[in-house]
Image (spheres, grey):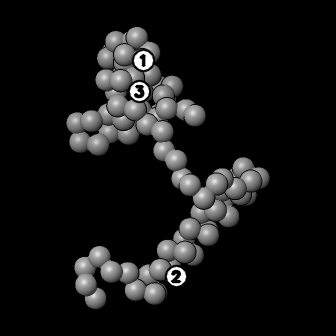
Amino acid sequence: MIKGDINNEEVHLLENIYDAIRNIEKAITGKTASKEIKFDWIENADFLKMMKVSERKAQYWRDTGIIRFSKIGAVIIIHSPM
């Protein structure tokens, strides 16, 4: 198999995982989302400008769970509610 190719068994496994995730989503929310999966995130610097807060205040909000975030290396990404 050439690197990057996916065989039929792997495709079937991925389809099963996707179906399982959609079933969990339906059980939790009572509905399913559209097939398009959307992520709405902004970088920390943009968040600070948008909210007009200091880095320390944003850090407090992250520490206390007020805002959701991910850290990838040195970059902080804030979840932007839709």
- Comparing 41 with 72, the one in front is 41
* Residue 21 drawn at (x, y percent): 59, 63
Q: Are marks 2 and 1 in contact (CB under 8 Å)?
A: no
Q: Tag 1: Cα neighbours inside 10 Å, few (<14), some, or many (≥20)?
A: few
**Which residue is identified by label 1?**
50
Circle 3 or circle 2, nearest the eye: 2
* Residue 24 drawn at (x, y percent): 66, 60
Q: Residue at x 64, y 62 (%)?
A: 22
Q: Is residue 23 above or below residue 36?
A: below
**Which residue is identified by label 3?**
63
User: The N terminus appears in which quarter of the rendering?
Assistant: bottom left
- Comparing 17 with 36, the one in front is 36
Amino acid type at circle 1 is: Met
CA separation in Å, label 2 and label 1: 43 Å
* Residue 14 drawn at (x, y percent): 49, 74
Describe the element under mark 2 as helix, strand or loop.
helix
Let me know if residue 27 appears in the view.
yes
The numbered disc on residue 12 is 2
Let me know if residue 57 appears in the view.
no
